Amino acid sequence: MVRVIGFLVGLVFAGVLLISLVSNAATYFASPPEATAAEEFHEHAKPLKLASDGPFGKFDTRQLQRGFQVYAEVCAACHGLNLVAFRDLKALGYNEAEIKKIAADWKTEVPSINPDTGEAATRPALPSDRFPDPFPNEVAARAANNNAFPPDLSLIAKAREGGAAYTYSLLTGYQNQPAELVHKFPDAKTPEGLYYNPYFPNLNLAMPPPLTANGQVTYADGRPATIDQMAKDVSAFLEWTAEPKLESRRAAGLAVAIFLLIATILGYLAYRQIWQEAKRKVRVTGVLDPANQAKNRRAKAKSGVAG
Amino acid sequence: MATRAQSAEVPATTDSGGSTGEEGVRRRDFLNVAAVSFAGVGGVVALAPLFVQMAPSADVLALATTEVDISKIQPGQGIKAVWRKQPVFIRNLTPKEIAEANAVAMSDLRDPESLAQRTKPGKMNWLITLGVCTHLGCVPLGIGEGENKGPYGGYFCPCHGSAYDTAARIRTGPAPTNLVVPDYEFTSDTTVKIG
Amino acid sequence: MSFSWAKPYEPKHPLMRWIDERLPLPRVVYGAIGGGYPVPRNLNYWWNFGVLAGIFLTIQIVTGIVLAMHYTASVDGAFNSVEHIMRDVNAGWLIRYAHMNGASFFFIVVYLHIFRSLYYGSYKAPRELVWMLGLVIYLLMMATAFMGYVLPWGQMSYWGAQVITGFFSAFPLVGEPLRVWLLGGYAPDQAALTRFFSLHYLLPFIIAAVVILHIWALHIPGSGNPTGVDVKEERDTLPFHPFYTAKDGWFAGAFLLLYAIVTYFAPNYLGHPDNYIPADPLATPAHIVPEWYFWPFYAILRAFTVDFILPAKLWGVLAMFLSILLLFFLPWLDKSPVRSGSYRPLFKRFFWLLVADVVILGWAGGSHATPFWIAVSQIASAYYFLHFLVILPLVSRFETPLPLPSSISESVLHGEEAEAAPVGSKKKRGGSVATAAAE
């Protein structure tokens, strides 16, 4: 009964699927879907080598400091970093006094209340504060940016396919829209107010190129701040903001992996030893008991049975 | 055939393993014990993060110090500040209150301490204590204008009647010890860093 | 426990005797996983995954309870509380990643366990209830995992909740009211988040209770084995402790090593970057996908694209539910008296086709819904239903199985191929009963 109903149900579902398949095939061959500009011209991120790559990589703190400088001087005007606290900058190699100064000098202040009048006010940041958002809310952010919302950058390296390589490619990927694209997809011409960037999934990005000139930032260590260098450095910094515990994670991982390897080997040896005894401890009984088998053989030989 | 099969499977039926014997027992136990203990140690270490995570997190520890501006506090006044999410009484003692505190004999005190011990040298007028009654944790009255300062002119806890004097020392009532003086330092004449 | 030779519990330590007299818990444990539970001696490594599933359930419960100490179930605070755990809570990053990847590994283990059961006929009499309880556990796991994924309140959390609760509106009349009732609103919002948190905390304990029933039901007939032949005598078995505790122990070490490597060195590999973006009800991600362990069902859902009497969306939802529901009927769909796929050559071929089919369905479910992948989903889904509802009943009716060994011991002591030949035949290597008797 169950099988009969099941049989029919199975045929029905398979049948409906077949109908869907045929219908889809018909639609596909009748009017094949058109390629889109995005599909053809989108480029995957350029490879980026960072000190933190690989299972044993570590952050290059000097690069992180340079990246932070790029963030502070170029990106912070529009992009928040609200999951990172000033005190976290200790990992970049700054000491307490430097962090206190960075926080106190930070251009955006932290929302607070006027202690005398109770009105909304702002106060300079403390090391225990998180980076204050450049705009008080999303509406203000959009109003100031042509209705685009500059995303918070704390997690951007984990929130985008390609991570730091993606941010690096994006920052260095601004270019003129290729004539071929405009020719093939006239509707995909970059609209006014957007900028063409093949690394962005939609090809046209609301953010104007933030890194426009070499030397836009003056690095404290004197390294030349080319656009490429600044893009690399800020990408490394953003890799850190997304995953500050990366180094301790991998260090712990190595210890745990080695421990488990040894534990597994010891466990396997113990297992083998226990099971060797199992095979040795077999007590043959009944038909397989050699005494019985001998008896059987003698009986059969006596009675002349061929077996 | 049967004998061959038999010998392949059961080389020695009497003891528990031909070449092992007594020494074999020790070898076998050692490996088992080693494997289980190693795994056991790992199990215990694996538990460590589960307990460590309950300790104060980095953001809580970051708020372990607070700076307070005391420039506006006149003698005879006090403010209630917050440190580690608890109330702190910062009081500017008048000379009369200082004299009262110093006049008390140590033998009269349940928790003997002099005012000098509870303040910083040269700043005996600044009394900084936790605003938490040492009995069961209520916030005593007396720091604000017009609040009941209790029979000893310091603080008074309405919950069970503990009364503190002008040096915030327990004088009467169930509280066992004086109001706690936290670690603090004057980073300038007008700012105090607590914690 | 029905084996007469099972060693009875004899506590030697006076404390254990004292406890046992008052609460026979040590006795129960001894009889379930100690020296008092006889297990077929010929189990292969496919039998390790049950215990491993229990280990991962424990890992999830323990890490989950600890995460709940720091998590805030509010639409404004959830995402930030998870980042607080990752950045500020001591070892928080480890506990979060362990929980996140623990869910994936729990599913990996359970899928291997389920496919073991499908191949070796573990669902057949007298273990039908063990199988059905297992399916209940699987359904509870899926509900738990779905709700857990919503909690971080990222883009995928929100939109995954939107899509999955959207299924219910496919049902005519009651669908939309049901959806609104489930969510406590018209879209996933505060009400949905808090109730999902509450239920996500609750369900694992219900899973644990059903796991106990599952093991209890198993221990009545005892464990199955790769030959599918019942245990006949003491020689066929070994006590669970120390033999299978040792085997499960070392294999667990190896599997946990794999889990540790993923958790510590590639913790986001099985996840989706979009869930690191805070939920935005006004912006749909380019490509909504559930977590990988739901991908085969997602493929089945999306395979139905044409209205045929019923709307396509309803077909998809019905098919998705049916794909799991039909498994409850498996013991009656496949009535072959031979349990193990090792002795069912025709069944074996279709089994591997099913494995390939499910893998393909999974791949299709995780891909963009292009015409190609939809077509693949359609063919693969059709095979899935045909396999269980049409092919298996026919195969079990008409196939010629290989002869079974007469007992587990014989297949262990003499080698399976030799024993697979019928008793009395001449074509064996030396040492078997038949040739010995013939001599």
Image (cartoon, rainbow, N blue to C red):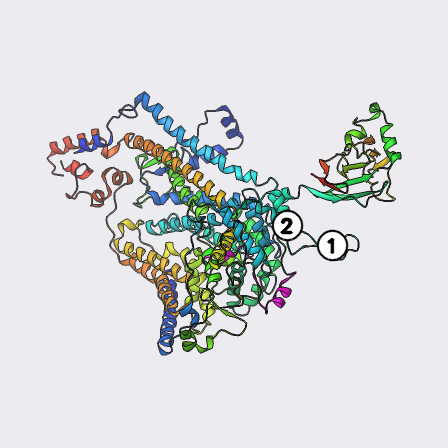
Q: Report the quarter where the N terminus of chain A lies.
A: bottom left
Residue A219 appears in the figure? yes
Q: Which residue is mark 2?
A: A103
Residue A113 bears which disc, if any?
Answer: 1
Horizontal and vertical percent for residue C11? 46, 27
Query: How far is mark 1 from mark 2, CA to CA?
Result: 19 Å
Residue C404, given in percent of the width and then of the height, sits at 25, 46
Q: Determine if the magenta segment contains residue A158.
A: yes
Q: Position of residue B86 (x, y in %)?
A: 72, 42
Query: Which residue is at the front of the view, A199 or A95?
Result: A95
Residue at the far left: name it: A304
Few, some or many residues within 10 Å of mark 2 (<14, 14–19, 20+): many
Q: Which residues are magenta?
A: A135-162
Q: Chain of mark 1?
A: A
Secondary structure of residue under mark 1: strand
Position of residue B60 relative to residue C322, above or below, is above
